[in-house]
């Protein structure tokens, strides 16, 4: 049962796919953001969060995180899953022609998911970032016309970006499976 004040730790920031998955799976909970999967699961063992929501696998990129190893290392157990459609978008600070872009930032998995788009636009150099939503935040803050990010549409809404191209992943059946991890000592039922 979800209680007022429950917190879910995620790898990612507001507007990321992890954030979206947490909103769908655990509506009404607060989210605590981390740069790494280990940071998110350590928040559970340290008592700062009730759960950690970790992306386990993606239909294009394959395994995202070794959830079983993380769970064992931090003495957590998987309690629920959610499969989220991943619709990657090209996002800039404002509407600009694709021909003006020189760099696109995103999480390595998102860049991998959009390989065909990047190959069709070879003048746009891919640059790895720690998180899709943070890439959008930084691109919007910098405000350069030659810079974009790859992320989901919610990141554009959260950080004030403009979607230049939607649904740019290599496959339209791009799905990510997220696993909700909880401390082994918890007795509350989380399937409600």
Image (cartoon, rainbow, N blue to C red):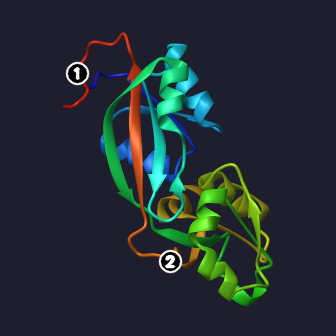
Residue 170 in picture, x, y percent from top left: 52, 76
Give the label on residue 166, or none.
Answer: 2
Give the answer, above or below, for where 171 lies relative to 53: below
Q: Is residue 27 visible?
A: no
Residue 78 quadrant: top left
User: Which residue sits at x=79%, y=84%?
Assistant: 123
Residue at 50% in and 65% down: 60
Q: Does residue 181 show up?
A: yes
Q: CA distance from mark 2 to mark 1?
A: 38 Å
Residue found 43% across the figure and 67% down from its top = 174
Q: Quadrant of residue 91?
A: bottom right
From the top left corner, tell me how far across and down residue 180 is, in percent.
Answer: 38, 34
Residue that carries the numbered disc 1 in the rendered image: 189
Marks 2 and 1: CB-CB under 8 Å? no
Q: Is residue 142 left or right of residue 53?
A: right
Image location (x, y in percent) of residue 161:
60, 66
* Residue 27 found in image quarter: top left
Q: Earlier in the sequence, mark 2 or mark 1?
A: 2
Secondary structure beneath dot 2 equals loop
Which part of the image, by quadrant, shows the N terminus?
A: top left
Q: Is residue 187 above or below residue 107?
A: above
Q: Nearer the viewer, mark 2 or mark 1?
A: 1
Coordinates of residue 172 in the picture (x, y in percent): 41, 75
In this rendering, position of residue 121 left or right of residue 34:
right
Q: In the image, what residue occupies the spot 53% across and 39% down?
A: 66
């Amino acid at each position: 049962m979800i209680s007022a004040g429950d917190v879910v730790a995620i790898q990612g920031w507001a507007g990321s796919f992890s954030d979206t998955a947490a909103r769908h799976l655990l509506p009404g909970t607060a989210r605590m953001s981390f740069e790494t999967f280990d940071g998110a699961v350590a928040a559970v063992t340290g008592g700062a969060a009730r759960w950690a929501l970790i992306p386990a696998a993606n239909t294009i990129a394959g395994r995202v995180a070794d959830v079983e190893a993380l769970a064992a290392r931090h003495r957590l157990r998987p309690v629920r899953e959610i499969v989220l459609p991943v619709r990657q978008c090209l996002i800039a600070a404002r509407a600009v022609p694709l021909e003006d872009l020189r760099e696109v930032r995103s999480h390595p998995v998102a860049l991998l998911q959009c390989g065909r788009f990047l190959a069709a636009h070879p003048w746009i150099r891919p640059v790895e970032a720690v998180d899709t939503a943070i890439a959008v935040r930084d691109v919007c803050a910098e405000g350069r016309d030659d810079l974009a990010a790859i992320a989901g549409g919610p990141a554009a809404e959260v950080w004030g970006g403009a979607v230049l191209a939607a649904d740019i992943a290599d496959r339209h059946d791009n799905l990510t499976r997220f696993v909700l991890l909880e401390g082994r000592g918890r007795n509350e039922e989380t399937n409600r």
